[in-house]
Image (tube, rainbow, N blue to C red):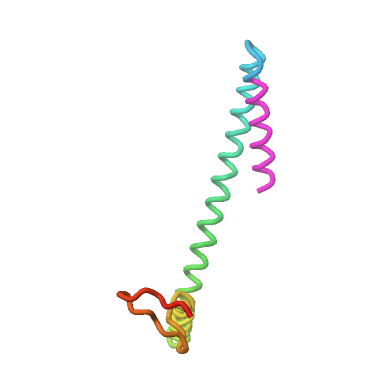
Amino acid sequence: MSDLKSILEQAEELLKQAASTSGVQAQELREKAVVLLEQVKEQTTVLQDKAVEKAREAGEATQAFVKDNPWKALGIAAGVGLLLGAMLKGDNEPKADSQPTPPDEPPRLN
């Protein structure tokens, strides 16, 4: 990943230099930048392919686990669902010792 960042920085620098020059030198700088950007494109394609393959492998492993352990998978899914539900619910309920003010009365000052 740092290789991609380095190549992008080099291409950016070449394009900045090309903007401040003219003629043949600017054209050469632009061509070098295009070559660097093509390298980035190739490397990102390779990274994307690797990520897709890893995701596919993870999906297959998950599917195999669920097929081999359906009750464990169900228990895990239920536990995760309960945990997420509890986290999303939060503390939205009023406390037992507080008394809500009716909407038609102004709040009382003590």
Q: Is residue 75 above or below residue 43?
A: below
The answer, for residue 66, to whether it is visible in the render is no
Quarter location, residue 13: top right
Of the pair 81 and 95, the residue shown nearer to us: 95
Residue furthest to the left: 104
Of the pair 88 and 65, the residue shown nearer to us: 88
Q: Residue at x 48, y 73 (%)?
A: 62
Q: Which residues are magenta?
A: 1-18
Q: Residue at x 61, y 23 (%)?
A: 31
Q: Position of residue 67 (x, y in %)?
A: 43, 80
Q: Residue at x 57, y 50 (%)?
A: 47
Any magenta on residue 51? no
Any magenta on residue 6? yes
Q: Residue at x 64, y 16 (%)?
A: 26
Q: Is residue 88 above or below residue 48?
A: below
The number of numbered badges drawn on the structure is 0
Q: Position of residue 86 (x, y in %)?
A: 46, 80
The answer, for residue 43, to whether it is visible in the render is yes
Q: Position of residue 49 (x, y in %)?
A: 53, 52
Quarter location, residue 98: bottom left
Of the pair 75 and 80, the residue shown nearer to us: 80
Q: Position of residue 23 (x, y in %)?
A: 63, 10
